[in-house]
């Protein structure tokens, strides 16, 4: 008996735990399944980013259909160019007084997040929030 409530603690029978797990699993959709899409063409990419503001910690940018990139990175102006090569977004950027070499990245959408993975999908990734 519980001293504060003068009641017995609830009992757990063999069926209540599996039933609770089934209920929780049926309500929870894994994050990787919520609107995940690999972007493979320039047209798919532009449909997502043209007119949108992409932001991540310390960086805000806009990617335009004319091949230009503008924004701010860590308090400095960001400028760059981009093109689409095979199934990759390729860009060369300048910010913080440095030129960042052209790098081709895979692009994936996870809900309202754009994930860009460097070195044709073999490197580090950056998640950008898409805002219209």
Image (spheres, rainbow, N blue to C red):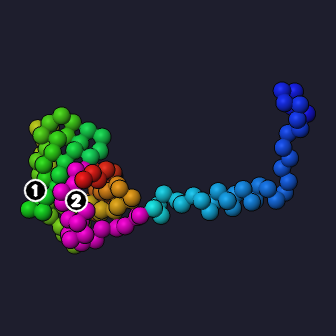
Q: Compared with residue 105, is residue 41 higher up or lower down, i.e. above or below?
A: below
* Quarter of the figure with residue 58: top left
Mark 2 or mark 1, which is nearer to you?
2
- For residue 26, side relative to residue 79 (left or right): right
Residue at the location (19% across, 40% down)? 73
Find disc 1 in the rendering and name its residue.
68
x, y percentage for residue 126?
Answer: 32, 50
Count of number-bearing discs: 2
x, y percentage for residue 84?
Answer: 18, 67
Query: Few, some or many C-alpha atoms within 10 Å of disc 2 (few <14, some 14-19, many ≥20)?
Result: some
Find disc 2 in the rendering and name its residue.
49
Q: Which structural element holds mark 2? A: helix
Residue at the location (60% across, 59% down)? 27
Residue at the location (30% across, 62% down)? 107
x, y percentage for residue 124?
Answer: 33, 52
**48 drawn magenta:** yes
Q: Is residue 18 visible?
A: yes
Taking depth in this image into account, of 119 and 116 the one nearest to the observer is 116
- For the N terminus, the quadrant is top right
Tell me where the magenta segment starts and ends, as one range: 35-54
Q: Compared with residue 58, is residue 66 higher up or lower down, i.e. above or below?
A: below
Q: Compared with residue 71, is residue 25 higher up or lower down, i.e. above or below?
A: below
x, y percentage for residue 10?
Answer: 84, 43
Query: Few, some or many C-alpha atoms within 10 Å of disc 1 (few <14, some 14-19, many ≥20)?
Result: some
| Residue 60 - label | none
Q: Which structural element holds mark 1? A: strand
Q: Is residue 91 visible?
A: no
Disc 2 from disc 1: Cα separation: 12 Å
């Amino acid at each position: 008996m519980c001293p504060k409530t003068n009641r017995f603690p609830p009992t757990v029978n063999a069926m209540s735990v599996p039933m609770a797990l089934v209920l929780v699993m049926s309500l929870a959709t894994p994050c990787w399944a919520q609107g995940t899409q690999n972007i493979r063409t320039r047209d798919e990419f532009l449909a997502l980013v043209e007119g949108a503001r992409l932001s991540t910690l310390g960086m805000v940018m806009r990617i335009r259909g004319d091949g230009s990139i503008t924004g701010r990175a860590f308090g400095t102006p960001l400028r760059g160019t981009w093109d689409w090569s095979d199934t990759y977004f390729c860009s060369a950027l300048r910010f913080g007084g440095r030129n960042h070499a052209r790098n081709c990245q895979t692009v994936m959408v996870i809900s309202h997040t754009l994930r860009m993975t460097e070195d044709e999908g073999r490197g580090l990734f950056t998640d950008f929030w898409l805002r219209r």
